[in-house]
Amino acid sequence: MSIPTVSLNSGFDMPVVGYGTYPLKGHRATDAILAAIESGYRLIDTAASYGNEEAVGAAVRESPVPRSELFVTTKLRGSDQGRGSTRAGLAGSLTRLGLDYVDLYLIHWPLPRVGRFVESYAEMADLQREGLIRSLGVSNFLPEHIAAVVAETGIQPAVDQLQVSPSHARADLVTAVRTTGTVVQAWSPLERNTGVLDDPSVTAIAGRLGVTGAQVVLRWLVQRDITSVPHSSDPDRQRTNADLFGFELTAQDMAAIDALDTGVPVKQDPATWEEF
Ligand SMILES: NC(=O)c1ccc[n+]([C@@H]2O[C@H](COP(=O)([O-])OP(=O)(O)OC[C@H]3O[C@@H](n4cnc5c(N)ncnc54)[C@H](OP(=O)(O)O)[C@@H]3O)[C@@H](O)[C@H]2O)c1
């Protein structure tokens, strides 16, 4: 299975579907990532705060797929934000991963009250120039946070990883981020299987097309030009979750999934959410 890529403003290509590794740790994480790579995933999404970077690094080394064909994303945790500590944060991640560069480095949360995301991003730009980061990105950034880092560095983030799914379509936010040239990547695209996959609108489309509810939801993202990092610990679900390019949703199907948007604000509001 070959997963298509999208061109980033950094000049690098990124798979449109990646493998989310949270909350796996240790051998279970390594085994799941190896199965995901075997299925065709090339993007592995981790974070310093997930406590599984060593397990990701082990999978990268054990996999028969060369490092150069894999795309590893990790994230700067809140406690490492700031001048000097951003460099140390990346160094820690690279050591745990056993890698000499990451493909994409994201600021995990803006933490506007802390007020260090702009200086952190500026330091990431230095680290990119040193070859330790291929593409600079952010996560959970609202347009005003992106505008602030661009004003300081002149570098548009390649990616903004945001909570996007049918119940939280966040269409205005996605449009605002995308019009600046930043690729949107959805986290928790399946809503952690808390109901959307069994919604009658989703199951009706899935039944007609002979695919799973998860494939319908993830294909809806593909057709909205939103990349994603779904997680599954199960090799069969991993495989079907990435098998999105042999079927298409009609305009009516797209409208049916669009109609699931609750309009309810996300609980982890980037303007106020804090985790370190
Ligand atoms: N940037 C951020 O702030 C942030 C925040 C949260 C997450 N993330 C990233 O985004 C990734 C994905 O988000 P997530 O893990 O929160 O949620 P998710 O991908 O929406 O859902 C994962 C859950 O859905 C189940 N699932 C997966 N495929 C399924 C299928 N085909 N049918 C039925 N159930 C299925 C999985 O169970 P099984 O394992 O049993 O299949 C798991 O419980 C994370 O792993 C992480 O890398 C980033």
Image: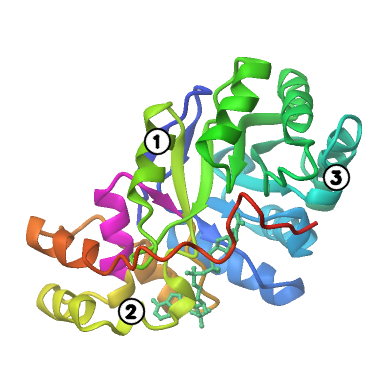
**Image vertical order of residue 122 relative to residue 71, above or below:** above
Q: Position of residue 272 (x, y in %)?
A: 66, 54
Looking at numbered disc 2 in the image, what kind of residue is underneath it?
Leu
Location of residue 125 by image quarter: top right
In this view, the residue in front, 89 or 209, is 89
Q: What is the crowding at mark 1: few (fewer than 14 residues within 10 Å), some, or many (at least 20)?
A: few
In this view, the residue in front, 221 or 24, is 221
Q: Position of residue 245 (x, y in %)?
A: 25, 55
Say if mark 2 contacts mark 1, CB within 8 Å. Answer: no
Q: Quadrant of the C terminus?
A: bottom right
Q: Position of residue 185 (x, y in %)?
A: 46, 48
Q: Residue furthest top?
A: 154
- Indicate which disc, 1 or 3, sits on the residue closer to the N terminus: 3
Predominant secondary structure in magenta?
helix
Residue where numbered disc 2 is placed? 197
Residue where numbered disc 3 is placed? 80
Give the alpha-carbon distance from disc 2 to disc 1, as whole Å: 27 Å
- Indicate which disc, 2 or 1, sits on the residue closer to the N terminus: 1
Q: Quadrant of the N terminus?
A: bottom left
Q: Is residue 224 magenta?
A: yes
Residue where numbered disc 1 is placed? 176
In this view, the residue in front, 115 or 105, is 115
Q: Circle 1 sits in a helix, a strand or a loop, which is it? A: helix
Give the alpha-carbon distance from disc 1 to disc 3, as whole Å: 28 Å
Q: Is mark 3 within 8 Å of ligand 1?
A: no
In this view, the residue in front, 147 or 214, is 147
Q: Is mark 1 within 8 Å of ligand 1?
A: no
Point 73% across, 72% down: residue: 25
Of badges 1 and 3, nearer the viewer stands: 1
Residue 257 in sight: yes
* Residue extent of the magenta highlight: 215-228
Q: Is mark 2 within 8 Å of ligand 1?
A: yes
